[in-house]
Amino acid sequence: MKHVSELTNLLDLERIEVNLFRGESRTVGSPRVFGGQVMAQALSAAMRTVPEDRFVHSFHGYFVLPGDIEIPIIFEVDRIRDGGSFTTRAVKAVQNGKAIFHLTASFQLDQPGFDHQMEMPEVLGYDELVSYDGMAKQFGDQLPENIRRILSIERPIEFRPVEFLNPFASEVYKPVRNVWLRAKGEIPDDARREHELVLAYASDYNLLTTALFPHGKAIDHRNLQIASLDHAMWFHRPFRADEWLLYSIDSPSASGARGFTRGQIWDTEGKLVASVVQEGLMREVKPKR
């Protein structure tokens, strides 16, 4: 996908019954469905059953089985509650009669209240950095083949990492990462839900791999099994996904073949717009002979 319009089309599900929707998949370089895609599609299904004046403030999802990229995904929405201010939905994503993903989402009317936030970290600006696309062009054949393949994948999101990771060495880094991101192309001003869906999709990038930084696996993921287990996201303030946002990520812990990561997302004015938490499977596997 070269443009964000291709992503928003992918997230615009086909309604096949009142609470039943169908979605297709696009590859991001893996034979399995990208976690950010099924997560954003499940959230899209929930949104289609919620009044337009209520917006998502949080969702929690569990990745149950790997998704098959070749067959459609069916999304079943359960209308849990419609309250005076809040609306709750549960969504089950199904392939071949089995659940591959579960999501619970809560929506709220816009309401005034107390307001505070942490300060945005001081990092290099996006205009001083090179994107993943630019790295592929800049280093070209000098990069290891597996790194070159990852960087050359066409994405609807542009990423510009703040910290430089040496692709030619298995260095150990602190489990901290900052990445600027924005959608490639414009999203309409009045399409608040599209901005939310695109950011939900993008939030699954760069997150779990941060937990590998202290283990000399920041770049080379060969002989590793990595998979998201669960993902939660909170939306604090309105934002534009087609303008630069800073994704500030850390990993407080890894144990039991699982990595735990957190992320905060800021706009260029320093407003904290969203927070993310994810835990995932990460373990070494024996190379095939």
Image (cartoon, rainbow, N blue to C red):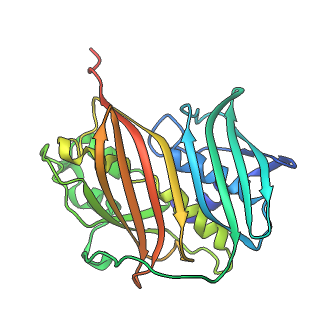
Q: Position of residue 140 (x, y in %)?
A: 24, 53
Residue 188, visible in the rendered structure? yes
- Quarter location, residue 102: top right
* Towards the viewer: 136 or 52: 52
Q: Residue furthest front?
A: 114
Residue 206, visible in the rendered structure? no
Image vertical order of residue 79 relative to residue 289, above or below: below
* Towards the viewer: 98 or 279: 279
Image vertical order of residue 195 relative to residue 44, above or below: below
Q: Position of residue 25 (x, y in %)?
A: 61, 44
Question: What residue sits 60% from the left and 73% below the top?
Answer: 187
* Towards the viewer: 144 or 100: 100
* Towards the viewer: 131 or 117: 117
Where is the C terminus found, in terms of image quarters?
A: top left
Q: How many marks?
A: 0
Question: What residue sits 51% from the left and 35% below the top?
Answer: 32
Whether residue 58 sits left or right of residue 172 in the image: it is right
Whether residue 116 sits left or right of residue 23 in the image: it is left
Q: Position of residue 2 (x, y in %)?
A: 51, 60
Whether residue 224 sits left or right of residue 196 in the image: it is left
Q: Residue furthest top?
A: 289
Q: Position of residue 152 (x, y in %)?
A: 36, 51
Question: What residue sits 69% from the left and 69% below the top?
Answer: 108
Whether residue 47 sits left or right of residue 67 in the image: it is right
Question: What residue sits 42% from the left and 53% below the top?
Answer: 205
Image vertical order of residue 123 relative to residue 232, above or below: below
